[in-house]
């Protein structure tokens, strides 16, 4: 059985919900799945003033070496001005030793994100995540157009061929059913791809 890690950062819970959906899809694809989050690095005063969601069922990842145990790594982070936030970037900045040794080469990778607005940088944020995965040697799986939910224009929803996404608005909008379906599709596709590569 392939092992999939869903690694995320979430300030307000949107990416936490997407992570759960990604994991659900990966399990449907036959994988053993762990969900971990990266540590919060914002000062406590900022977390409190901004009303970040601090209760979660998911443990903080033990460190970069934990990545080695997985066949696939699916990374989720919200946008900060069109790129991944510092919390996730700081984690990947600690993976230099893995890069040097080639420990992640050949694994499968994918990305998911959220933005406050429809055109708030979803694709550039996905690319900022995928760039790290490509440098580490992962084989990238996107949200292909086999997922027809990203083809509609009747409703405003996230989704791009580069990864699953949700639109949070002012924070009150929760992930749409179609966005959660996209996350499940992505997780399942990653799990099935990894299973083929590591059969």
Image (cartoon, rainbow, N blue to C red):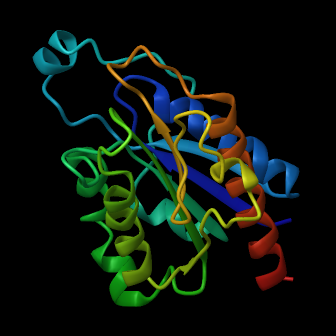
In the rendered image, the quadrant that contains the N terminus is bottom right
Can residue 198 be seen here?
Answer: no
Can residue 45 be seen here?
Answer: yes
The vertical placement of 106 against 87, above or below, is: below
The vertical placement of 21 against 6, above or below, is: above
Where residue 96 sits: x, y (%)?
28, 76
* Residue 18 appears left or right of 42: right
* Nearer to me, 100 or 198: 198
Residue ranking furthest to the front: 154
**Residue at the (11%, 15%) spot, across then down:** 45
* Residue 146 appears left or right of 9: right
* Residue 190 appears left or right of 198: left
* Residue 48 appears left or right of 188: left
The vertical placement of 156 against 7, above or below, is: above
* Nearer to me, 21 or 152: 152
Where residue 8 sits: x, y (%)?
46, 45
Where residue 137 sits: x, y (%)?
47, 85
**Residue at the (74%, 74%) spot, across then down:** 194
**Residue at the (36%, 42%) spot, across then down:** 78
* Nearer to me, 132 or 180: 180
In the rendered image, the quadrant that contains the C terminus is bottom right
Where residue 90 sits: x, y (%)?
23, 55
The vertical placement of 97 against 121, above or below, is: below
Q: How many numbered circles are shown?
A: 0
């Amino acid at each position: 059985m392939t092992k999939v890690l869903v690694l995320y950062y979430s300030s307000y819970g949107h990416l936490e919900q997407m992570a759960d959906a990604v994991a659900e899809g990966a399990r449907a694809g036959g994988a053993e799945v762990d969900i971990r989050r990266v540590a919060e690095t914002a000062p406590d005063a900022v977390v409190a003033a901004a009303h970040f969601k601090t209760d979660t069922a998911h443990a903080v990842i033990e460190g970069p070496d934990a990545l080695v145990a997985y066949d696939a790594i699916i990374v989720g982070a919200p946008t900060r001005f069109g790129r991944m936030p510092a919390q996730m970037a700081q984690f990947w900045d600690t993976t230099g030793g893995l890069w040097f040794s080639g420990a992640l080469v050949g694994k499968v990778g994918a990305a998911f994100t959220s933005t406050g607005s429809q055109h708030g940088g979803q694709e550039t944020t996905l690319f900022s995540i995928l760039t790290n995965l490509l440098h580490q040697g992962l084989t990238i799986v996107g949200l292909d157009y086999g997922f027809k939910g990203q083809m509609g224009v009747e409703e405003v929803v996230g989704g791009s061929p580069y990864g699953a996404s949700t639109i949070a608005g002012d924070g009150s909008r929760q992930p749409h059913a179609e966005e959660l379906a996209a996350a499940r599709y992505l997780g399942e596709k990653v799990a099935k791809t990894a299973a083929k590569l590591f059969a």
